[in-house]
Image (cartoon, rainbow, N blue to C red):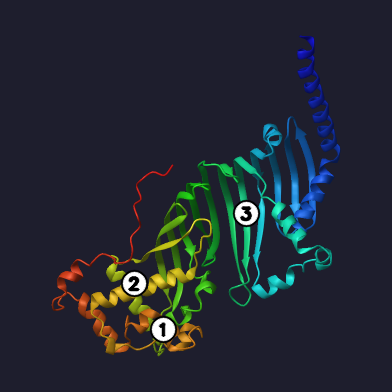
Amino acid sequence: MKRIIKIPLILAIVVLVVYTAIYVFLLFAGKGLLTRKLTQLTAMEVKVGELDMAPPLNFRVKNLIIQDLFEADSLYVSTSLIGFLTGKVVFNQIKITRPQFKLVILPPVLKSSASKAPDTQKTASLPAGAASGIEKEKKPPRLAFKYFLIEDGSLDFTDYNVGEEGITIKVHQINSSLTNLFLFPRSVKTKFKLSARIPWEKGGEEEEGKVEAEGWLNLFKKNMQATVDIRDINGIYLYPYYANWVDLEGARIEEAKLNFSSKITSVNNDLNAACHLELTDIVRRPLAEEEEEDKASKIADAVLSIFKAFNQGKVVLDFNIKTKMDAPRFGFNDIRLAFEDKLTAARKKTGFRGDSILTLPIDLLKDSAKSASDISRAIIEGAISMGTELKKVLESPFSKNGANNGEEAAHPEKDESPSADNNEDKID
């Protein structure tokens, strides 16, 4: 009987001694160990201000700096001792206070030159089977995050893939929360919430765009439901992203706000995003004295008139994006195609004639069109015409006295663009 009692007692003492030794080691050597590990992972200079510990495995890092990547006033990490004993790395809580993230997107040429060449000398001497065997042994870490919180963060995003000097977007007041994220097979709902602000100047005054997102996802079943709402964004500042197919200078558009919302649903990895895009507060530069209106300006007049006529005076675009949850794809090209489809639908409703088309000039497309097949599909299909003839065509269907069209003008038809799937069924 005494032996039965002694065995658990001895095991408890051994565990306590081992834990105490590890705790003391981390208490004195933890700062240096953390600095070295982060330096190895990021290949950048790392500085750690202070490292505090509390039983059983709770850490607080102050003034953490990863050069050209990340800074934070405070990083609190609470890990699960039971998780370690079962072969998993489970974080009960991670809280980052006032982090500053830096993200730079380089063009493919610069990215390949900046990356380090693989060390072929070490791998050349290994047999092919041995190398493949090493790769097979590597398994993704069994990580879990029960609660992840970001308070008052900021992000400096620079994209050198667009424009001559790239484009920089600053985001601040980032507040985000995430619960129950498991990176190993387990069917569980991961809930998330995000809010942020994007400052920009308008006429010398500072205004703010707003970003909000909320929803849940199941990584195991690849199911998801979420909403994204982005409002009051400076559409002119983002011009480098769509400069290849829009001429703002020629269209005389000086200011415009962009609103975007999306309802995202994924079932078994098939993701559908029902998107709504709206332009508001459009300000156009008035024509100077004796200045002739060029083709780009006339096209802008026509397009704005078409959009407003079919959307109660608003410039809106509704479209769906179908992609995969584990490999999502979305870009400005999706908006361009939806825009062209909208104009094509307008042509059918207003009765534009194919023989009244005047193709867009190449300079309007900023040299993006190298041949007729590259020009906008809407233009090829006869979406708009130019000059006096365009004016007559546009005025006819929307005129109060237009023959056979008065009723349509008073009650414009609904947008024919794809509508969002309701998907009211709940997903476990």
Mark 1: few/some/many CA within 10 Å (<14, 14-19, 20+): many
| Residue hosting label 1 | 296
Q: Position of residue 303 (x, y in %)?
A: 35, 76
Give the number of the disc on residue 154: 3
Residue at the disc numbered 2 = 342
Decide: marks 2, 1 in contact (CB < 8 A)? no
**In the rendered structure, which amino acid carries the disc numbered 2?**
Lys
Of the residues shown, which amino acid type is indicated by label 3?
Ser
Pick whichever, 373 or 388, lies toward us: 373
Q: Splitting the image into 4 quarters, where does residue 259 fall?
A: bottom left
As drawn, 346 above or below 73: below
- Label 1 secondary element: helix
Could you tell which of marks 2 and 3 lies nearer the N-terminus?
3
Give the amino acid type for the residue marked by disc 1 in the picture. Answer: Ala
Please rate how many residues cluster around mark 2, counting C-alpha atoms within 10 Å: few if below 14, some from 14 to 19, many from 20. many
Q: Which residue shows up at 45% across the image and 56% down it?
A: 271
- Foreground: disc 2 or disc 3: 2
337 left or right of 92 in image:
left
Residue 156: image quadrant is bottom right
Q: CA distance from mark 2 to mark 1?
A: 19 Å
**Which quarter of the image is occupied by the C terminus?**
top left
